[in-house]
Amino acid sequence: VGKAMNPNLFFDEVLEFVGYDNYPVWGGSLEPEAPSLVAMQLDMVRCWGRRRPDSNSFGGFTIAEQLIGAQGHDIIGFTPRPDQAVAWSAQTLAHGADSLLFF
């Protein structure tokens, strides 16, 4: 009997909800990630969730940290432009997040 983890069982039976930190910019980045890359990451996170019993779609997920200002620890990176945080938030909700916390 193999002892390999079955990821389907993990996502279907163990995971209660999916959470993700959305940082389109990190560290000393001079510009944010391409919107298409962020969209792909959000779609991937959405697929980690459970399927809704009433349809063939996946359930939502929580964004535990959404970047809204300049960030960094020892280096301050890219500062979002006016309304950039609004655009990132709209993109996050459009790709399936059902809750969004700003950090």
Image (tube, grey):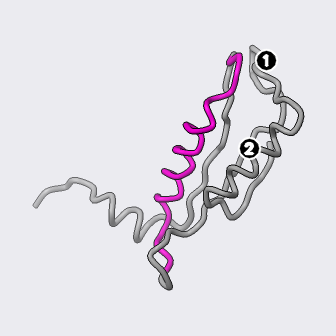
Q: Amino acid type of disc 2?
A: Trp
| Residue drawn 65% across the image and 44% down it | 21
- Assign a secondary structure to mark 1: loop
Q: Amino acid type of disc 1?
A: Ile
- Assign a secondary structure to mark 2: helix
The spot of residue 86 in percent (x, y) is 82, 45
The spot of residue 82 in percent (x, y) is 89, 33
Q: Which residue is mark 2?
A: 88
Residue 34 found in image quarter: top right
Q: Which residue is mark 1?
A: 76
| Residue drawn 50% across the image and 64% down it | 49
Q: Magenta span covers which residues?
A: 29-52
82 or 52: which is nearer to us? 82
Say few, some or many: other residues with alpha carbon within 10 Å of mark 2 (under 14 / 14 to 19 / 20 or more).
Answer: many
81 or 69: which is nearer to us? 81
In the picture, measured across the screen, residue 33 lies left or right of residue 73, that is left
Q: Is residue 74 above or below residue 90?
A: above
User: Tags 2 and 1 in contact by the CB under 8 Å rule?
Assistant: no
Image label count: 2
Identify the mark nearer the N-term, 2 or 1: 1
Residue that protrudes farthest toward the right in the picture: 82
Residue 8 found in image quarter: bottom left
| Residue drawn 13% across the image and 56% down it | 2
Residue that protrudes farthest toward the bottom in the picture: 54
The spot of residue 102 in percent (x, y) is 80, 47
Which labelled disc corresponds to residue 20?
none
Q: Quadrant of the N terminus?
A: bottom left
Q: Is residue 27 above or below residue 47?
A: above
